[in-house]
Amino acid sequence: MPFEVFPYALIFRIRDDELQVIAVMQMSRRPGYWKARDQSWK
């Protein structure tokens, strides 16, 4: 069953046969906050 509302975003990477979760971000409070923290998003 899919989530109706999921106010979180994930940063992850896949390497070989492994999924690595780098960050779980709450998006409902300050959605632009994480973009300012990581310059590679620009």
Image (spheres, grey):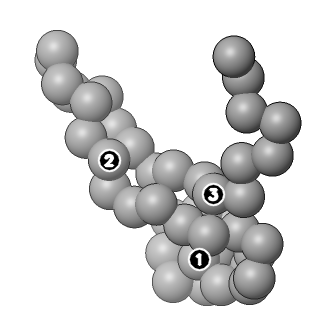
- Which residue is denoted by mark 1 in the rendering? 34
Disc 3 crowd rating (10 Å Cα; few below 14, some 14-19, many 20+) is few
Q: Quadrant of the N terminus?
A: top right
25 and 39: which one is in front? 25
Give SS at disc 3. Answer: strand
- Three-letter code for the amino acid on which mark 3 is drawn: Tyr
Q: Is residue 31 above or below residue 23?
A: below
Label 1 vs label 2, nearer the camera: 2
Looking at the picture, tell me which residue is in the foreground, 13 or 30. Answer: 30
Q: Left or right? Give the position of 29 relative to 11.
A: right
Q: Are there few (<14), some (14-19), or many (20+) residues within 10 Å of tag 2? A: few
Residue name at image x 54 percent, y 66 percent: 25
Q: Would residue 16 be seen by someone viewing this image from the given angle? A: yes
**Among all residues in the image, which is located at the extreme right?**
4
User: Which secondary structure lies at badge 1?
Assistant: helix
| 41 and 23: which is toward the camera | 23
On the question of residue 39 being in view, the answer is no
Q: Separation of disc 1 and disc 2 at Cα?
A: 15 Å
Residue 41 placed where, x, y %?
A: 59, 63
Secondary element at tag 2:
strand
Specify whether 6 is left or right of 39.
right
Q: Which residue is mark 2?
A: 21
Residue of label 3: 8
Mark 3 and mark 2 lie on one chain; the one further toward the N terminus is 3
In the image, residue 4 lies at what x, y percent?
83, 36
Q: Residues within 10 Å of mark 1 (few under 14, many from 20)?
A: some
Q: Position of residue 39 (x, y in %)?
A: 52, 75
Look at 81% across and 46% down and name the residue there.
Answer: 5
Whole-number angstrom distance, CA of label 1 to CA of label 3: 12 Å
